[in-house]
Image (tube, coloured by chain):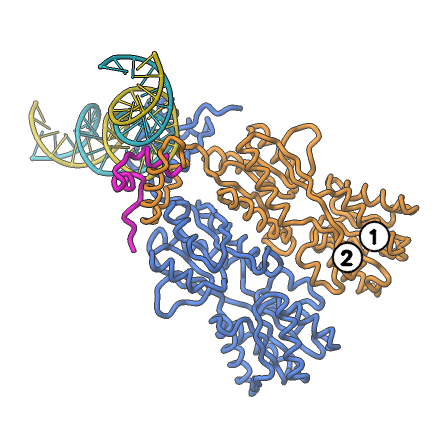
Chain colours: A blue, B orange, C cyan, D yellow
Amino acid sequence: MKKTVQTIADIARMAGVSKSTVSRALNDSPLIAEETKARIRAIAHEHHFQINLPARRLSLKESRTLALVIHAYHKDFSVADLFTLEIMGGIANGVSAYGYDLLIVQVDPRTTDWVHAYIDTGRVDGFILMTSSRKKSHIQTMLDSSVPFVIWGPTPQQQKYCTVMGDNFAGGKLAGEHLVKIGRKRIAFLGGPPEDLEVQRRYDGFLAALQAGGQTLEPERVGWGDFCDTSGGFVMREILQRAPDVDAVFVNSDLMAVTAMQVLREEGRRVPEDVAVVGYDDLSISRFTTPQLTTVRQHIPMAGRLLAQTLIQYLQTGLVNNVTVPVELVERQSA
Amino acid sequence: MKKTVQTIADIARMAGVSKSTVSRALNDSPLIAEETKARIRAIAHEHHFQINLPARRLSLKESRTLALVIHAYHKDFSVADLFTLEIMGGIANGVSAYGYDLLIVQVDPRTTDWVHAYIDTGRVDGFILMTSSRKKSHIQTMLDSSVPFVIWGPTPQQQKYCTVMGDNFAGGKLAGEHLVKIGRKRIAFLGGPPEDLEVQRRYDGFLAALQAGGQTLEPERVGWGDFCDTSGGFVMREILQRAPDVDAVFVNSDLMAVTAMQVLREEGRRVPEDVAVVGYDDLSISRFTTPQLTTVRQHIPMAGRLLAQTLIQYLQTGLVNNVTVPVELVERQSA
DNA sequence: GCCGGTCATGCAACCGGTTGCAACTTCTTG
DNA sequence: CAAGAAGTTGCAACCGGTTGCATGACCGGC
């Protein structure tokens, strides 16, 4: 089944019109008579015409392609990057809903040269950035060259750029309120990196909830990890040593919560009887832990779609949007 | 920092040569004098020239872009797709090592129209396909239109196309030999889908190992799942009901092994004392289970690189390659 | 001193779309 | 009935690269 119809010039010949007319007809231009459009579209469809996108991109000077910038948490991709995987599905959905393509750009987070390597070559129209150790230098580079992008992260105070983020204050608050409500008295906070603004907001919301319940958050019951799976266990162990009487813990990511629960079990604590655990994210694994994890849902697929949508809207209208995705407490067994 | 140098015509002007000379110089053509090349390259580098790829693609009629075709196991991406995530890292590495880009194409596996939608538009040069329920119809569509592709899966008997696959026979054999060696006598097989050729090879290798050890594989100790996490638990429970005296099980994926171990624990069996468990894949999670999972390593990052490499080699030379990736037993605690 | 060969470079066409502007119909209107 | 408006379509330039072929410079050999 060889294709004989490859270009709009072929279609033009068959329809007895010019290239321009075919181009306009296929783009539904108001300049062309409805009748002509219908005829041309019929011919195109009948011959399975597929437009040549590199040519169109060259003409339009836009690639209709977005880059998802990622890097493995460790050397290779692993469960530690499960959040990235889950949100990628949503991003792919959002991107394709608007007729855009999604390019995967795996980078060394210490570099920024990929920005120009992908934008100036016209390969992509903009970038989507997830959580990364070096996000600040990335953002600065893109701002300096006015490259379109959206990040998963907090709304900026000084500069203007697109963001999508979970409602971290509300998330921390929900977790705190729940633990207070079920009667816990010595509640711990196992956070992500303390310099992370998202983590700070969760802390603020969490603290507010405890204080509203007449409780305090003692420093020995606070520890900081790095979001990634293994750190949950380490930090949980530290907290247990400092505060052996802890009876609940709010862990800033489901991945950390999994290993934290392992450590609790190893140390002879029952979950949730002795120590209640609340996670964060509602990754797919939280349903498969024993006991099943109570957690703050980030609505990850929706967040992915919003990332795509926000960036595309910016590309098309120049509108800078800072979206907050609502969170929700999912009560399972661990708290 | 605005860019004033955008096209090779700009460079040509600055160097006092023609467009063609610049084009040839940047592509290291032997037609151009070394001295001239050096001068042009210096100017290009100095002005941070980045070539316009849509234009080049239009001219060369190749996109230097590969599509990774994926679909979520369930509705959204989840741990069930962890294999896809981990291999994606390797694919991205391999692809970028050859100067190609990686496009993510999320499809409904029941359709095949994406093949022409991506190839005929010149967006991608070829496809990389992972395990999928409808792979046969996909393969047939691509073969019919002689579209370049590589799949993760077994070497075809009738047709010729590129494949990369783990050594499933050897993998099954390693698992069987190990369980025999540690003295188990009533060994079970918890497979993936029975119609899957990879699963059949693992079964063959496993059976061969048991028989070499003077053992048989009774039908009541054989069960079939679907690779995905939840099915491991279900099928494990079935096997336990049919054969309560089972003392070891070879599970065809780490994901299924995780839930199988949960069920074993729920049913009061200790792992590995009462029932030894061997998984398959060596996903990152296998290190984080309790007990840590003994498993057959697929060398996933390497497999990803090989997928990219095999397809690119085919695109550039037309060579059809069927690669087998060696496997290896990783002994941890569960067996 | 002329000729053929080698080497380096330029000209111009081409890849397959998009689009400003001109041109042609047909219709309306004074 | 002429003139202007409105509605369609075509011409040709342009997007920014690549490449076949022509051209011109310089060389050594006879």
Q: Position of residue A205 (x, y in %)?
A: 51, 77
Left or right of A219 on screen, residue B323:
right
Label at residue A117? none
Tell how many labels: 2
Find out whether the residues at labels 1 and 2 contact each other: C-beta distance under 8 Å. yes
Residue type marked 1 = His
Label at residue B331? 2
Q: Position of residue A104 (x, y in %)?
A: 50, 49
Q: CA distance from mark 1 to mark 2?
A: 9 Å
- Asked which secondary structure carries label 2, the reply is loop
Label at residue B178? 1
Residue A56 appearing in the image: no
Q: Position of residue B18 (x, y in %)?
A: 28, 34
Q: Nearer the viewer, residue B17 or A280?
A: B17
Residue type marked 2 = Glu
Q: Which residues are magenta?
A: B1-27
Mark 1: give few (<14), some (14-19) or many (20+) Cα within 10 Å.
some
Q: Nearer the viewer, residue B277 or B332?
A: B332
For the C terminus of chain A, the quadrant is: bottom right
